[in-house]
Image (cartoon, grey):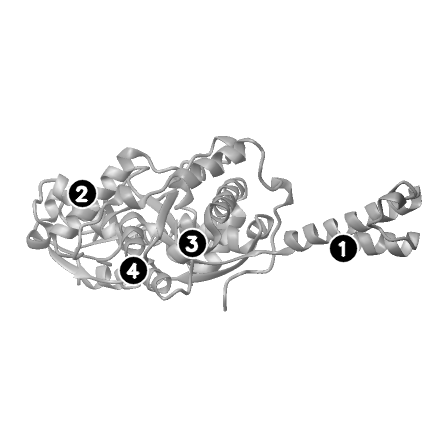
Amino acid sequence: MTIIRRALKKRMNKPFEAPCNRSRLTVTGITLALSVGVLVSTSFSGARAQQKTPITVGSITTWTPGGEIYDVLCRTNIFELNGFDAKCRGFSYAPPLGEALLGGLIDNAFGADSPVIRMAARVPGTKILHRTTDWVFGILVRPDFPGKDLASLRGARLSGPFVTGTFMSSMLKLIDAGIKDPFKDLKLINQDLSDQPLALASGQVDAVTTWHPMFKKLVDTGAARVLWAAKQGDGLGIQGLSGPWLAKYGEEGAVRFLKAWIMAVWWTSNNIEQANEWFAETSGFPVEYVKAGPEGDRYLRAPHKNINDMTFELLPGEIKEMQRVMDYLYTRNLITEKVDVAAMVDDSFILRAQREIREGKHPSLSDIKPVENLYIK
């Protein structure tokens, strides 16, 4: 109002406050006042519109199809369209990503179920917000391994990264197959993904727990054959946002982040060849191995045209299965405290994001375009 009053004083050369002078305001004076008011309002709105929410996200560069979706987020303007000033970091698998979350280098907890739950439990206030993707994992054996089912692995040498969701879920599958205590009934070796081809070829191990694209590579090159593979939905990817980030940017920020995720899944589904090429570059795997991951996801196996019916909330049965995994970790002394998974999940943000997507409250999908890579070099 001070700016408007000064403008009127200058224009009319009369004291603005005098009641007797208000009736003498000319049309020109009113127009000037309104113009100044609009200018102030427009400038303020423009300044607010230019403010971007900072976020640094972590992705896993050996894991598909989550890797494709993050490559789309980090190689298009989807983050920008949803009001973010984003940066991206790549990690070989979940444990180093979790350490980055703990150190405040990234703002998201991302990966398979058990690693993300463990990450979230270590950073106060962190919430698990949604399901990300379906992903395929399994147990592969040397081509000359005599067994035909999971029970035949009793006494075998099996390797995999112990702290991954793949390894823990595979242990539960072995229990379901009749091997009551895999940690006693098998010779288990903690081994990184990159060591699996040589370990199988040299006979160091009989079997590995692995996921795409390494899964596809080992099978296609004849280094291993499939003993057991998960069905769609057995591999559950999840994601959360850190407590400090949520405390600062709240529900509004989280909902925009989730809208960006949904838009990225939709774009990936309808531009899968481009997404696969990007992730092949990021991961270092040939594209023929990379593309196996999306083939196991409900929205990526074929173009999904309608963004309005894409859903990512975690269902009660999925939360129950995650609790089973965490309880197993606790009984094996692999974690020191029990975890209440349901208490860590907050589906209110994804439900609101999905509702607003259906209502058309999202950036135009036709505005999505490739941009300069957002990965920190």
Residue 29: image x %, image y %?
90, 47
Q: Nearer the viewer, mark 4 or mark 2?
A: 2
Camera sees residue 86: yes
In the picture provided, is 132 more to the left or to the right than 172? right
Q: Nearer the viewer, mark 4 or mark 1?
A: 1
Which secondary structure, mark 1?
helix
Q: Earlier in the sequence, mark 2 or mark 3?
A: 2
Q: Earlier in the sequence, mark 4 or mark 1?
A: 1
Q: Nearer the viewer, mark 4 or mark 3?
A: 3
Q: Nearer the viewer, mark 3 or mark 1?
A: 1
Residue 200: image x %, image y %?
22, 59
Q: Nearer the viewer, mark 2 or mark 1?
A: 1
Q: CA distance from mark 2 to mark 1?
A: 72 Å
Which secondary structure, mark 4?
helix
| Frontmost residue, 329 versus 38 | 38
Point 53% across, 31% down: residue: 358
Q: CA distance from mark 4 to mark 1?
A: 66 Å
Q: Earlier in the sequence, mark 3 or mark 1?
A: 1
**Which residue is denoted by mark 2 in the rendering?**
173
Type of amino acid under label 4: Leu
Residue 170: image x %, image y %?
20, 47
